[in-house]
Amino acid sequence: MLIERLLPAARERLATIGLDVPLIEAARLLRSPETNLVIVCGTEGAIAGIITKTDVVGRISECHGSSCITNASSVMTRDVTYCHPNTFVKDVWSIMKERGLKHLPVVDRELRPMGVINARQVVQALLEEVEYEEQLLRDYVMCVGYR
């Protein structure tokens, strides 16, 4: 199964901002329960970094008075792990486990964001795949659908 099958739900979690947008805008987007990561895009629309709730809290904890006026680009994580729609779900799960990630951006060939998948969604897709294979095997053993 490919990630492209999970894109409709992943698109609902997509939240993006520009490099020069104030960090407070990222914080506003992160207030939504469905949004756990904001993708920061460059001028061409390609992914430049991500901002998580942890990033926002970390920056705010260092603020003094009006010093919280900073751009998203100064807080974002620049080394972003992402996947493409043609990546296999099992490969994405391996990456998420290996790196301890709960969310992963999905990008197109030009690195423009398409959505954000989460670990729960990936595990559910893997479970569906296993259940389908189990059903096929059961039907084969029981000679269901065969003459």
Image (spheres, rainbow, N blue to C red):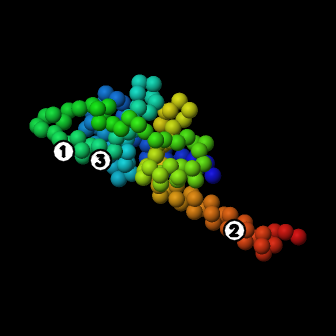
For the C terminus, the quadrant is bottom right
Q: To which residue does mark 3 refer?
A: 54
Mark 3 residue type: Thr
Q: Amino acid at mark 2?
A: Gln
Question: How far, Cα to Cα, is label 2 from label 1?
Answer: 52 Å
What's the residue type where badge 1 is placed?
Ser
How many other residues sit within 10 Å of disc 2, few (<14), some (14-19) or many (≥20)? Answer: few
Tell me residue 45's x, y (percent). Answer: 45, 29
For this orientation, the residue located farthest to the left is 65
**Residue annotated with mark 1:** 61
- Write the residue at 55% across / 40% down: 84
**Residue 6 visible in the snapshot:** no
**Which residue is at a point 54% across and 35% down the rendered structure image?**
108
Instruction: Using the numbered discs, state the Cα–Cα distance from disc 2 to disc 3 in whole angstroms.
Output: 42 Å
Q: Residue at x 44, y 49 (%)?
A: 99
User: Looking at the image, can residue 24 be seen?
Assistant: yes
**Relative image position of residue 125 (x, y in whole percent):** 56, 57
Element carrying mark 1: loop
